[in-house]
Image (cartoon, helix red, strand yellow):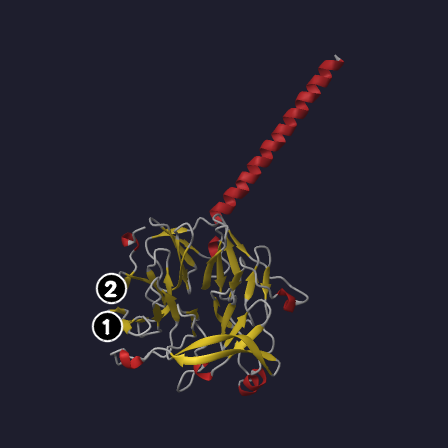
Amino acid sequence: MTWCILLLFSILTIFSACNGQNTTQVVNNDLISQNSIVATGDTVSELGKSILIIFQSANGNYWFGSDVDGVYRYDGKNIIHFSTKHGLCNNTIREIKEDTSGNIFFSTQHGGISKFDGQKFTALPVSKSSSPEKDWKLEPNDLWFKGETGKNGPYRYDGKTLYHLVFPKHFLADTYYAQFPGNSWSPYEVYFIYKDRAGNMWFGTSNFGICRYDGKTLSWMYEKELTEIEGGGSFGIRSIIEDKAGKFWFCNTRYRYEVFPGDSISQGNSLIKYRKETGVDLSKANNETDFTYFMSVAEDKKGQLWMATYNSGVWQFDGEKITRYPVKEGNTNITIYSIYQDHQDVLWLGTHEAGAYKFNGKTFEKFNPGRLKR
């Protein structure tokens, strides 16, 4: 009898343990299912009109970031729309980037940065560092973001922690704030981030010009014509690129810059040493349209620069000749926000109100998902 009781107790114990494991597994599966449902997205037949950012991930998927609608993913067959209702932290997208593990990151205007791991969105918490000046580092796999509108400085993500990095006081800060005491925006706000061939990080700001970080020093470069528009207004540094000759372009077509190693110190700030050269000679354009500033720029495999302007189309510059590609909807010029080159060297345009455009070898045409070839 004693052995029977012990045997029965053992069986009941094993059954209870197995039943507990099964219950736990069901709960976990429910949680996974719920997370998957959150990021399922909505299948749609077309993109929204305001497509500012275009990005192709390593697996070939295209991501389209909207100014108002969140993001769209296109896999060659279906368009899936994701928004805040699916877990995205904000519907205004400023950047799209990817890490070495295939996670996709969306930098938004007001909601911070969302990470998409293929199943769900996660908002990255910002580190509240007691010594933010020590958080400036330069590691090869770090991701850099513009972050939210109106903030001072960029954001750096090392795969575990998101750091908000603050620029030190600019040498023109006192003059600027005396002239514009009530501005609601920050002159330090990052408009553009670029990594050059040497691994240095460049930051285009709203009103304080360009900052370069080489892993040790933050160095500044400021010229009035790079930031302020002739006749009034501010453009800011919205695009930076290093061309095939190693010269730099800072969203202004008239000049390019040879940047020298080493820095000089002025009023407590390190200044970039450079020499200004002639950029695009507009007399060779054979066109009455002037385009001093470009919103975005890409370099093709031949080393030619493709400069996307706000409302004067796209200009191709091969180092000598300049060719204009109008971008129109009927007789109306399309306002362009960005230009992007995908893995197949195809050029894309993000626009404010006309969706996405794709270059067919002769002209930029409105993107029709059914005609994209993978």
Q: CA distance from mark 1 to mark 2?
A: 18 Å
| Residue type beneath disc 2 | Lys
Q: Position of residue 248 (x, y in %)?
A: 43, 73
Question: Quick check: can you spot residue 187?
Answer: no
Q: Badge 2: few (under 14), some or many (20 or more) residues near its Cα, within 10 Å?
A: few
Residue in view at x 60 percent, y 69 percent? 216
- Secondary structure, mark 2, is loop
Residue in view at x 42 percent, y 73 percent? 247
Q: Position of residue 185 (x, y in %)?
A: 52, 76
Task: Choose mark 1 or mark 2, whichever is in front.
Answer: 2
Residue at the spot of label 1:
331
Residue 96 falls in image quadrant: bottom left
Residue in view at x 60 percent, y 66 percent? 136
Q: Position of residue 167 (x, y in %)?
A: 58, 73
For residue 305, above or below residue 88: below
For residue 356, above or below residue 42: below
Q: Is residue 244 left or right of residue 178?
A: left
Residue at the spot of label 2:
362
- Secondary structure, mark 1, is loop
In the foreground, 371 or 30 = 371
Indicate the quadrant containing the N terminus: top left, top right, bottom left or bottom right: top right
